[in-house]
Image (cartoon, rainbow, N blue to C red):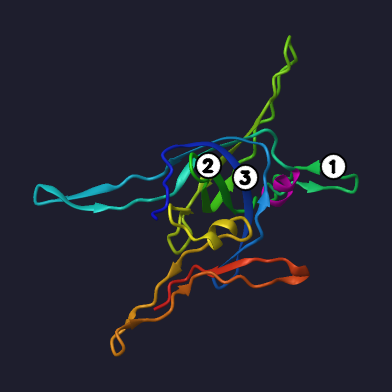
């Protein structure tokens, strides 16, 4: 029996972030995803448009220009963990959050999902950065109006070109249920052996080693092998 397919999507929920570390050899490590409760809205627009090279009087070649996405993530309130992990605000001895202009913010993967009429659609943007949210509020009037906080998000390609991934109609249960356990990276099929005419087992572009204190991290190499 074929899988039922979503006809519509609505509601954003289950937002997570996972810190990125890049070593000297260009190997990228994703930390364990951390929940960001209180998602209100997400709006990201494609960044970069194809451009044409003209020769012989017509568009001779179209140049791809996928630079990822840009937009806003609106939350009820930015979690303290995100402020310390990504925006690099620090807690002093009195547990007061301090913002320092001399500290660089961190990049991260952004995971989230949309509800569907059949099944939730889960997404990951691999290489995101966030700008500091505005400081704003208003006085109470006859009714209390909740003041949200908005992060400006830039999602750029990784060095290997990956921008994002999302679950499909036939995504395996293992991948779907483990979406927020570690950052998913695509699996690549090995070429067919000309002698046996059989394909080698699929090779994962992702490994999941166990780090210290039992913390799981997803690791992959952004370098292209010859």
State the mark number for residue 114: 2
SS at mark 3?
strand
Secondary structure character of the magenta stretch overall: helix
What's drawn in magenta, residue-wise? 80-86
- Name which residue lies at 74% across and 16% down: 139
- Name the mark nearer the viewer: 3 or 1: 3
- The residue at which mark 3 appears reads as 14
Q: CA distance from mark 3 to mark 1?
A: 28 Å
| Residue pictured at 65% horizontal, 50% vertical | 105
Which quarter of the rendered picture does the N terminus lie within? bottom left
Q: Badge 1 is on which residue? A: 96
- Of mark 2 and mark 1, the one earlier in the sequence is 1
Residue drawn where x is 67% and y is 37% of the image: 38
The answer to whether residue 169 is above or below residue 207 is: above
- Give the percent coordinates (x, y) of residue 46: 41, 43
Residue 142: image x %, image y %?
73, 9
Q: Disc 2 to disc 3, how far (Cα)?
A: 9 Å
The vertical placement of 195 against 183, above or below, is below
Q: Nearer the viewer, residue 74 or 9?
A: 9
Image quadrant holding the C terminus, namely bottom left
Q: As drawn, which residue projects farthest toward the right? A: 94
Q: Residue furthest left?
A: 56
Q: Tag 1 or tag 3, which sits nearer the N-term?
A: 3
């Amino acid at each position: 029996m074929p899988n039922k397919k979503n006809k519509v999507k609505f509601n954003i929920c289950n937002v997570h972030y996972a810190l990125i570390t890049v070593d000297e050899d260009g190997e990228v490590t994703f930390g364990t995803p951390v929940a960001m409760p209180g998602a209100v809205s997400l709006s990201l627009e494609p960044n970069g448009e194809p451009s044409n090279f003209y020769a012989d009087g017509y568009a001779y070649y179209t140049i791809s220009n996928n630079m990822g996405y840009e937009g806003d993530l609106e939350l009820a309130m930015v979690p303290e963990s995100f402020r310390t992990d990504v925006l690099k605000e620090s807690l002093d001895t009195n547990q007061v959050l301090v913002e320092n202009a001399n500290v660089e913010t961190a990049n991260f993967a952004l995971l989230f999902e949309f509800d569907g009429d059949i099944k939730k659609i889960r997404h990951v943007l691999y290489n995101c950065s966030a700008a500091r949210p505005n400081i704003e509020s208003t006085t109470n009037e006859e009714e209390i109006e909740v003041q949200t906080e908005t992060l400006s998000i830039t999602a750029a390609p990784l060095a290997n070109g990956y921008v994002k991934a999302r679950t499909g109609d036939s995504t395996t249960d293992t991948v779907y249920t483990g979406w927020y356990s570690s950052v998913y990276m695509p699996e690549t099929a090995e070429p067919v052996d000309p002698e046996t005419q059989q394909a080698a087992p699929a090779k994962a572009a992702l490994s999941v080693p166990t780090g210290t204190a039992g913390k799981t991290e997803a690791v992959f190499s952004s370098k292209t092998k010859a």
